[in-house]
Structure formats: structure tokens, C-alpha cells
Image (cartoon, coloured by chain):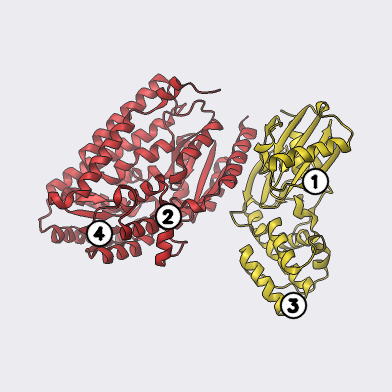
Chain colours: A yellow, B red
């Protein structure tokens, strides 16, 4: 069976197509202002790339914050269930999933059959999310893609104590003004993200193997900081950012 | 399955109209007390109201008023006004809304009637102490504070003596404020009626044990008003007797509160007053009925300590051991009893930034429920009256995921 998953997040829209449990392809695009349009265009772009026609897709599940705006999907399922299903698809032994996306972060406890046992989500504050890192990158005048490698060079991470994005930004600006080294500030930012997420993870209970998914999993600095904070090793699949869409496509085959 | 208009009509509760009538009459009495020569006392929701009823004083509840403010979606504006007066946005939204509405004589029903006295019992929180002090100063009215020691595990002899003595001081305070002698025979009768009202309220809530349940906690949030404001009066007893009969009839006729009850849930903490309809429709769309809650149960939870033949002593114990004045281990026992009694599939916790004593132990309670009964839970973050703190899409995702999780588990 050929199925598609479409994940409309706050920053990016993702699509994935699976055929009998095999990933045929995936794609990421910016969501922008129009979530409905973003879902359609990322899906159509993927179809074109794979040289497939829409009628060959037997079922579609949408997920993410814009899940209900994907009008052509057969079903909308929350990203929590989809990230569980996606991570289980990538590694059937996985027991904990840490998903950090654009506007929220969540920790999932996964049952041995891939269903979700429990989850915790960040509250309304954006601290500890992809958006937080974007704000920090702007303050640091750095490219977000360089954040991970740069932070690994730090030997003495700065202390970012604030739990609020706006205040943390002022804190970072004052650290820059004090002349602290760029690598240390970035490492400090990653540690503050890790500290937020790790307390949420402890609430759910961390069982290995642990997988990190979502766009922020691409940042090696956050992954390493989380490993240190939780004292476990964390696996990151090359499909981490499209994991929600993969999970949606997996679920689409079951409905 | 779409619901027809006839289905919706049969699901509608007949008692709602009567309840509105009684509450309207009650507020008219309270607002015109100055003309009828009766005294008005402001009292906290967990305070012992029975001595007021016995003295023919009209009790008025800023917290009930807070619920009205929330349900009328006037909370954000009033809370913002209180913040402009200098009150922190971290404070209880009932307190903020009430203080602001006093200042502008605004809010639903044009504000509450002026108090002749205030009675504050700290068995529900510590905020009420300062809140009532502020209001007593503003209205220049005498304030009585009943200090109920926190019962981590038990109601000690020292606590018993301490509270019992204050009950006598409370009576002396009322005698002084009304210039009337306290009538102990009347007190006994009011006590008996109060206990009867609480028994009936518990019986109403217990009809939700039935499958399908004839009522949801959203119904309970509405019908609660009388047991809070007028306990100890015959009108309350009559009302709950007829509500109970209506619920029993619904059970007999197989009328369910929601169209297709597939899952049963337990709610914890105060309602999110400005989002009642949205939440009730959201859960109903998932075929989930919130059959019970810890909040409305709090007004009959003390029944186990109450004795109509020794009302004042037993009242002292009952009010001291209120749900928010006991240790988390004790709260866990009550929640687990409710999980079993109402046979629920999941636990919904409103983490209420307004109500710290209610929200503080929630993660421990959640862990215990998960460990002891293995049922999933979800946390919704908000303020009970200040709608600025509610995030719809975040809440929606949590509820949807929670229901999907229960669906995965239960099928």
C-alpha cells in the first residue's frame, strides 16, 4: 500500500511517502502564512520529485498544528501519536521519543508495540523550542545551521538562567556585550534548552533507547547537551525532521 | 453520527431553568438587602456558612461571582484592571477580578452588594487572607478569619481545640455584627438541612456511576452553585431532590449526557469557566464523557465527618479537612477512590495558575494514578477566569493526543 503523511508544523511543512513500509521519499518546506497551501505544495512537490501521480497514493494522514487544514487528507492525527509511530518505524526498540519542533517540545513514553503510553508538552512558553533557537541565532548574528558545530568547540558554556525567550535574548545580548566568546554563549543556549527538556523528560520517565526527532534534532549541540543532562545516549535518524510525516504515513496504512 | 434536534432536546436538563430562577432570586435578595434590613456577609467558598444562615445573614460568595465573571468572559478585562492597580498577574484570577469589580462597580449583575462583614476561612488557600483584608479595608467592614490548620495526615486534638474555639469566636463575631443572640436550636436545624443538602448533592453526582452517565462534570459545575451559596437552606434541599429525581429518570430512560459515551474521564481542579462549552464539545466529539470531578465533589466530601447531632464540632472537623487542606497522600486516596467508583478510562488535570494549592501536587497525583490504576492523563494549563492565559491550539493538541492514546489503549 502506498500512503502519504503530511506534517504541518509552525515553521516547516513536511511530507513523506511510504510504499509497503519503505520510505520512497520525503520533503521539507517553509509553512509560511498559509498552512493549507503549504500542505498542498510540499505534498505536490514530493509527488513531482518521485514522478508519481496523486491517484497512486491510497491514503493520506495529516498531522502537526495545521493538521486540520489539510483538507484532502483522509484523517488528521496529532503529532504526538505520529512521532511515536514514526520513531517506532525507524527503531522498533525505541521507548522514549524527544520531539523538539518549531513551537513546542514534547517527550513521549512509547509502549513496546509503538503506541504512546504517556506524554508531556512544554507550556505556552516558546523557550526550549526551535523558535527559541531562531531568536538566539538572530541575536548572535549566526546561521542556525552553524550552531551545533560551533557549540561543540566550547569548553566553558555560558550560563543562561532565564526561562523566557524574550528575557533569554536580552541575557544573550548582555553576554555578547561583555565579550563572552561566541561558542560558549551558543553552548550555554543549548544547555538551557536541554535543561528545560530534561525536566519534562524526567516527568514522563526516561527509558532507553531514546530517540530525538523534529527539526531541532539536526542541531548536534542540543543533542549532546541533552545526552549530558539525561545521562543517556540519544539516537538521531537522518529522517528526524520528517519523522512526524513518516509516522503519519505509517498510521495511514493502518486505518 | 450527527445528532438530531429531538435528541438534543431530550438531552437538555429540565432543572436548569429552576436553578436560574433560584440564583436570580438569591442575587436580588442580596442586592436589595440594604432596603430589607438584612445583613450581607462575604464568605469564602470553603467557609462555614451555616452559622450565617442560622443568623439570617445573606451569604455572598466572591468566588461564585468569579465563576460568573469567567463564564461571562469578563475575566480578562477585570484582571487587567487589577494589574493596572498593581496586583501581579500571577495572583489568583478570582481575587484579581473581584477586587477590580469592587472598584468599578462593574462585572456581571453590576457588581456584588456591599458586605456588612466578611468571613474568611483559609481551608482553601492562603490568598483569601490578603484578598479579604483588602476588601475589608476597602468596604470598611469587620473581617473574621477562621484559621484551619493544614491536615497533612490527621486532625489532631490540638487542631480540634484550636478550630472549635474559633467557631465560638465566630459566633460571638456574628452576635456583635448583628446585635442579636445566636440561636443554637436554629443552628441545629440549619446543620441538619446542610447535611441533607450535601447528601443529596453526593447522590446527584453519584448518578454518573451509571453507564451511560446522565450528566457530565460540566453539568455539575453549573448545578454546584446552590450547594456552595445556599447550603443549609430548604430551597437547596428541594432543588437537589428534584435534580436527583430528574437524573434518576434519565438513567431509567437511558438518556445520556453525551450522544455516544465510549470513554469515561475524571476532571481535576476548577473549571475553565470561559471555555466550558468548547471543552464539553471537544470531549463529546471524542465520545468522551467527563463523568466526575474532584472540584464539585469537594462540597460533599466532608459528609464523612459530619454529625447532625453534634453539628458544630463535626463542622469544625469537616471544614478543616477540606480537599485543599489535606496532604497530597490523602488527596491521592480520594482521587483513586473516584477513579474506581466512576470507573474512568483517563484523568484530565487542569493545571490552574490561579489556584496554587489545587495545582501544586498534581504531578504526584498523576504519577500515583498512573502507577496504581494504569490510566493515562493529560494536563491543560490555564487560569480559571483569565482567558488571556488559554491557548486553544495547544490545548486542542493535548486533548486530541490524549484521546488518541486512550483509543490506542482501549480500542
Question: Residue B360's x, y, as percent?
Answer: 49, 56
N-terminal-most mark, 1 or 3: 1
> Given this view, does label 1 or label 4 mark the residue nearer the observer?
1
Tell me, yes or no, whether the two marked residues, 4 and 2, touch with CB atoms within 8 Å: no
Q: Is residue B271 visible?
A: no
Question: Residue A243's x, y, as percent?
Answer: 77, 44
- Binning the other alpha carbons within 10 Å of mark 3 as few (below 14), some (14 to 19) or many (20 upward) gives some
- Binning the other alpha carbons within 10 Å of mark 2 as few (below 14), some (14 to 19) or many (20 upward) gives some
Read off the residue under disc 4.
Answer: B118
Quadrant where the C terminus of chain A is found in the figure: top right
Question: Residue B80's x, y, as percent?
Answer: 44, 59
- Binning the other alpha carbons within 10 Å of mark 4 as few (below 14), some (14 to 19) or many (20 upward) gives many
Residue A180: mark: 3
Tell me, yes or no, whether the two marked residues, 2 and 1, touch with CB atoms within 8 Å: no
Residue at left 12%, top 54%?
Answer: B182
Q: Chain of mark 4?
A: B
Residue at left 10%, top 59%?
Answer: B179
- SS under mark 2: helix
Q: Chain of mark 2?
A: B
Q: Quadrant of residue A124?
A: bottom right
- SS under mark 3: loop
Residue A136 vs A120, above or below: the answer is: below
Amino acid at each position: 500500500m502506498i500512503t502519504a503523511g503530511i506534517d504541518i508544523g509552525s515553521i516547516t511543512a513536511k511530507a513523506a511517502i511510504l510504499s509497503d513500509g519503505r520510505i520512497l521519499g520525503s520533503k521539507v518546506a517553509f509553512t509560511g502564512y498559509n498552512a493549507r497551501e503549504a500542505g498542498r505544495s510540499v505534498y505536490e512537490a514530493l509527488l513531482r520529485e518521485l514522478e508519481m501521480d496523486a491517484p497512486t497514493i491510497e491514503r493520506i494522514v495529516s498531522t502537526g498544528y495545521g493538521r486540520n487544514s489539510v483538507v484532502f487528507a483522509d484523517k488528521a492525527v496529532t503529532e504526538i501519536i505520529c512521532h511515536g509511530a514514526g520513531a517506532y518505524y525507524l527503531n522498533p526498540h525505541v521507548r522514549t521519543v524527544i520531539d523538539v519542533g518549531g513551537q513546542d517540545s514534547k517527550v513521549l513514553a512509547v509502549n513496546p508495540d509503538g503506541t504512546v503510553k504517556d506524554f508531556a508538552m512544554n507550556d505556552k512558553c516558546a523557550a526550549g523550542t526551535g523558535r527559541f533557537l531562531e531568536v538566539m541565532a538572530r541575536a548572535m548574528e549566526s546561521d542556525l545551521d552553524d550552531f551545533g558545530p560551533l557549540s561543540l568547540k566550547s569548553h566553558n558554556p555560558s550560563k543562561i538562567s532565564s526561562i523566557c525567550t524574550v528575557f533569554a535574548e536580552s541575557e544573550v545580548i548582555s553576554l555578547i556585550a561583555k565579550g563572552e566568546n561566541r561558542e560558549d554563549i551558543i553552548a550555554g543556549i543549548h544547555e538551557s534548552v536541554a535543561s528545560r527538556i530534561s525536566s519534562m523528560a524526567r516527568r514522563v520517565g526516561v527509558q532507553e533507547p531514546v530517540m530525538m526527532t523534529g527539526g531541532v534534532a539536526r542541531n548536534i549541540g542540543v543533542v549532546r547537551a541533552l545526552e549530558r543532562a539525561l545521562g543517556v545516549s540519544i539516537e538521531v535518524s537522518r529522517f528526524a525532521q520528517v519523522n512526524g510525516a513518516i509516522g503519519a504515513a505509517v498510521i495511514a496504512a493502518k486505518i | 453520527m450527527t445528532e438530531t434536534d429531538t435528541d438534543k432536546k431530550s438531552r437538555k436538563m429540565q432543572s436548569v431553568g429552576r436553578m436560574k430562577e433560584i440564583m436570580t432570586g438569591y442575587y436580588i435578595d442580596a442586592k436589595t438587602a440594604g432596603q430589607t434590613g438584612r445583613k450581607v456577609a462575604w464568605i469564602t467558598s470553603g467557609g462555614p456558612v451555616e452559622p450565617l444562615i442560622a443568623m439570617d445573614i445573606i451569604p455572598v460568595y466572591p468566588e461564585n461571582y468569579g465563576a460568573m465573571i469567567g463564564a461571562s468572559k469578563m475575566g480578562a478585562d477585570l484582571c487587567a484592571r487589577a494589574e493596572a492597580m498593581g496586583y501581579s498577574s500571577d495572583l489568583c484570577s478570582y481575587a484579581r477580578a473581584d477586587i477590580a469589580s469592587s472598584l468599578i462597580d462593574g462585572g456581571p449583575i453590576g457588581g456584588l452588594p456591599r458586605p456588612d462583614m466578611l468571613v474568611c476561612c483559609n481551608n482553601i488557600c492562603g490568598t483569601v487572607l490578603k484578598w479579604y483584608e483588602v476588601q475589608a479595608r476597602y468596604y470598611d467592614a469587620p473581617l473574621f478569619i477562621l484559621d484551619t490548620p493544614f491536615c497533612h495526615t490527621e486532625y489532631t486534638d490540638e487542631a480540634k481545640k484550636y478550630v472549635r474555639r474559633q467557631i465560638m469566636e465566630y459566633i460571638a463575631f456574628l452576635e456583635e455584627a448583628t446585635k442579636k443572640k445566636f440561636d443554637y436550636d436554629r443552628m441545629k436545624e440549619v446543620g441538619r438541612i446542610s447535611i441533607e443538602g450535601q447528601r443529596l448533592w453526593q447522590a446527584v453526582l453519584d448518578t454518573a456511576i451509571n453507564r451511560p452517565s446522565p450528566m457530565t462534570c460540566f453539568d455539575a459545575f453549573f448545578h454546584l452553585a446552590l450547594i456552595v451559596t445556599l447550603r443549609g437552606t430548604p430551597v437547596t434541599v428541594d432543588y437537589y431532590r428534584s435534580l436527583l429525581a430528574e437524573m434518576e429518570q434519565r438513567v431509567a430512560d437511558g438518556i445520556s449526557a453525551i450522544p455516544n459515551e465510549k470513554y469515561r474521564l475524571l476532571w481535576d481542579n476548577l473549571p475553565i469557566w470561559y471555555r466550558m462549552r468548547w471543552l464539553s464539545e471537544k470531549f463529546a466529539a471524542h465520545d468522551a464523557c467527563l463523568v466526575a470531578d474532584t472540584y464539585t465533589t469537594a462540597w460533599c466530601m466532608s459528609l464523612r465527618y459530619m454529625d447532625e447531632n453534634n453539628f458544630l464540632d463535626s463542622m469544625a472537623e469537616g471544614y478543616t479537612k477540606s480537599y485543599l487542606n489535606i496532604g497530597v497522600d490523602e488527596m491521592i486516596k480520594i482521587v483513586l477512590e473516584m477513579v474506581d467508583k466512576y470507573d474512568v478510562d483517563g484523568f484530565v488535570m487542569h493545571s490552574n495558575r490561579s489556584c496554587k494549592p489545587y495545582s501544586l501536587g498534581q504531578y504526584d497525583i498523576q504519577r500515583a494514578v498512573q502507577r496504581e490504576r494504569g490510566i493515562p492523563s493529560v494536563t491543560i494549563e490555564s487560569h480559571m477566569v483569565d482567558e488571556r492565559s488559554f491557548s486553544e491550539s495547544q490545548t486542542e493538541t493535548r486533548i486530541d493526543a490524549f484521546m488518541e492514546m486512550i483509543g490506542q489503549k482501549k480500542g
